[in-house]
Amino acid sequence: MDVILPNLGFLLSGLATTAVLALISIVAGTVLGIVLGTLRYTSVPVLGQAAAIYIEFTRGIPLLVFLFLFYFALPALGGYKVSAYVAAAQGFSFFIGAYLAEDFRSGLRSVRPQLKQAARASGLTETQVFRHIVLPIALRRIIPTLFNQYVRLFKFTSVASVIGVSELTGRAMLVNAREFAPIAIIVTLALTYLVCCLALSSIGRALSHRFTVRT
Amino acid sequence: MSDRPMIEIESVSKWYESFRVLSDCTTAVGRGEVVVVCGPSGSGKSTLIKCVNGLEPYQEGRILVEGVEVGAKGTNLPELRAGIGMVFQHFELYPHLSVLENITLAQRQVLKRSKAEADERGRALLARVGLAEKERQMPADLSGGQQQRVAIARALALDPKAMLFDEPTSALDPEMIHEVLAVMSELAAEGMTMMVVTHEMGFARRVANRVVFMDEGRIVEDVETEAFFTAPESERGRDFLSKILNH
């Protein structure tokens, strides 16, 4: 405790950075996932195939390499500068978006064709069928999967310390370098992630219970 | 309006790949008429009824609903469908919406009614099918018969000119069939134009004006109800009736 307490403020602000980074990436990644998943689901020509290629590509690259891409390679290629924090947010969003896209797609595909037919029979257009029937049912059904991915992402954010983002893990390592108390510091670090992830998955369970679709 | 039938089906044929599911089907449903379509399973009854509101495309012939050709390129299918209610074998209620929301969704999205208007109409229809107290329930909380009555209310909410029923009681337990048929009989008595695919021959005999008997994608008989039950013209019709009536 005597190594943690004096550094508590420093570590907590790292935790805040981690939480905000995770939240931004979750929101952006989810939006990207819905868009890509919908393109895959409706098999829009060209765009649908482009989405498929993007998803395959991303899922075949290690997360750390993906972050390097956004921090070093793309800025060099495009001639722009980016902070480690922004690069990490971009990397995580695009990374998780590719995984979420497949989850969204399978959720969309879980809606029975007969149900869509019934919705069409009542005069709804294809867009209305998608917006009012297919999408809401799919979203509700994939809440558990979604939150599994969010928990994964929350833990992934520790990788951002490698490119120098001063988030929780990065700051814990700094404290450790100064105090050299690896047991206390790393156990505290691990427990902090654990508690956050448990909280996140219990939110997921509550939501999934609240919005369950019974047939 | 003219004496023209509400629904006209003229020489309609349909193929799935090379398999012909409908062969040269011709019939019509007049205003206020109740036509029962029956026949063995796989005879094309459901496919034919789904062609009427364009849920299934057909490759030959014409289907006209109040003179509008269903299969024509320029036809606004959502608009045409909004004027024809449809009830399905497996109810197809929206599982994520409450009973009342099931009935108000298309009213609001298609007919652009206000929430208050749609709710009022929805409640009136729920009362009419005997389910006024169920409006807040989810579909999964209702029995099959209740779900099917909600589905009928959902279809009626758009004030349809005609109703299509695709085996509305086939998925129901015997004790629930009656409650659904009762609602349908009431509708018929009020003068609703109806096309009903069903195996309920008692209902057909009591309610239908005409019976269309199908076999292997063809309309084999298209006659007055009494004529069908007392003296079916075709061998296959006689065979079907003897099997279905003497079980």
Image (cartoon, helix red, strand yellow):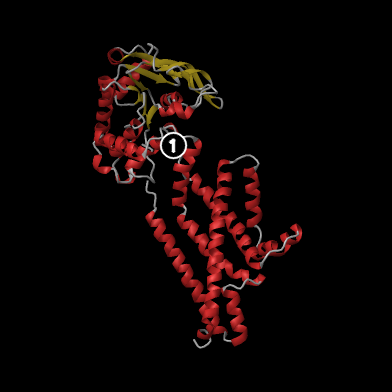
Q: Residue at x 61, y 86 (%)?
A: A178
Chain under numbered label 1: A
Above/below status of A207 relative to B8: below
Q: Nearer the viewer, residue A17 or B31?
A: A17
* Percent x, y of residue B61: 51, 17
Q: In percent of the image, x 54 and y 66: which residue is there?
A: A20
Q: Is residue A60 left or right of residue A29?
A: right
Nearer to the camera, B123 or B217 = B123
Q: Would residue A51 appear left or right of B212 to someone viewing this image?
A: right
Q: Is residue A161 above or below residue A37?
A: below
Give the labeled residue for mark 1.
A114
Q: Residue at x 70, y 61 (%)?
A: A69
Query: Image quarter for residue A154?
Result: bottom right
Q: Quarter of the image holding residue B44?
A: top left
Using the rendered image of the protein, determine whether residue B7 is visible from the camera's viewpoint. Answer: yes
Q: Residues within 10 Å of mark 1 (few under 14, many from 20)?
A: few
- The structure residue drawn at horizontal position 53% and vertical position 21%, both measured from the top left corner, is B72
Which amino acid, mark 1? Gln
Q: Quadrant of residue B230?
A: top left
Q: Left or right: A113 with respect to B196?
A: right
Image mark count: 1
Q: At which x and y percent is residue B83?
A: 40, 26
Nearest to the observer: residue B127 or residue B57: B127
| Figure check: B186 above or below B118 | above
The answer to whether residue B172 is visible is: no
